[in-house]
Image (cartoon, rainbow, N blue to C red):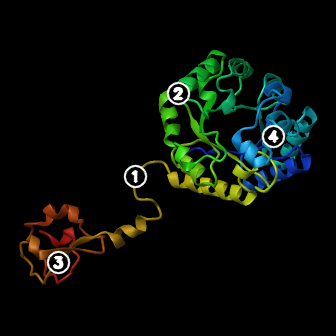
Amino acid sequence: MKPQTIIIAEAGVNHNGRMDIARQLIDAAVAAGVDYVKFQTFKTENIVSRTAQKAAYQAENTGDAEKGQFEMIKRLELDREKHELLIDYCRQKGIRFLSTAFDLDSIDLLEELGIDLYKIPSGEITNLPYLQKIASKGKPVILSTGMANLGEIEAALGVLYTGGIDPAAVTVLHCNTEYPTPLDDVNLRAMNTIAEAFKVPVGYSDHTLGIEVPIAAVARGAVCIEKHFTLDRSMEGPDHRASLEPEELRQMVHSIRNIERALGRGIKQASPSERKNIPIARKSIHLATNLPAGHVLRREDLRMKRPGHGISPMDLDLVLGRRLRRDLETEALLSLNDLA
């Protein structure tokens, strides 16, 4: 069986700036059985200008196209103290904490907080100083590739490798950054293209509605799945509408774990559960009519019927032309002991 897929429940900014909601999101992630619950770490002043407009999906989901990105995300910012409280709460609940840094200061903050790996978001894949900073930390990296082509992925990996990151410690996630992603734009086969091109473990960061696509990604070899979730899709905020609710998250995890079990080892043979069906479902060589001892068997004397614990029809040539040792009746199951 393949190693267990790492499942990251992306709380992101769906806490709406409230610690009580953030804790409830952690509780929901624990109940769903994911491996990591992930937030976002940023200083608003470092990542967006005061004149930056919202993305179309952000304007639609917040119902306010007039106010820009700065005001929207400033209220979603988590300071150091809140990070410490959330990390401690995750520790109490037995789930691993993860956060995506969106600026250089935030990378340092996460390093000081003892994060065990770095998740690079799609928007930073062409940010050279950011990639160099991540590489300098020397920890495992998960790289999202939304909006990127193979050349941009190659360049980003080159920066990480040159900076000292072990290629074996990098996982590359196929991703589409539209919220929600239309199914026609998912292009899940690109995940396997990435794996073939760069010889890296691959996964999938999903922004579609529903749970079908991440489950399909696991069936296609994903070793990591990232999926946004919320307490309630009707909540106010930019990402809630493209997120799973807690029960859907639980169903996704359950389905992925089932798919992992179903993938097996890749060896084609009768499974333990079906071996008992071999004599029931397969056929053996039987007689078509009553035949006396000494009769030389011809093709018309024989029928292939169930049960299948006699001579296999694949051994028909070993039977034709042989003499019977004894009288046999119609539908008798032929055995090698019956043949001279």
Distance, label 3 to label 1, CA atoms, is 33 Å
Amino acid type at circle 1 is Lys
| Total numbered labels | 4
- Residue 177: quarter of image: top right
Residue in the image at 65% along x and 46% along y: 207
Q: Which mark is residue 150?
A: 2
Report x, y in % for residue 269: 39, 55
Identify the mark nearer the N-term, 2 or 3: 2
Quadrant placement of the C terminus? bottom left
Q: Are the residues tagged 4 and 2 within 8 Å (C-beta)?
A: no
Residue that carries the numbered disc 1 in the rendered image: 268
Residue that carries the numbered disc 3 in the rendered image: 287
Residue that carries the numbered disc 4 in the rendered image: 66
Depth check, mark 1 against mark 4: the one in front is 4
Report x, y in % for residue 286: 20, 75
Residue in the image at 76% along x and 32% along y: 116
Amino acid type at circle 3 is Leu
Q: Is residue 210 toward the left or the right of residue 295 in the image? A: right
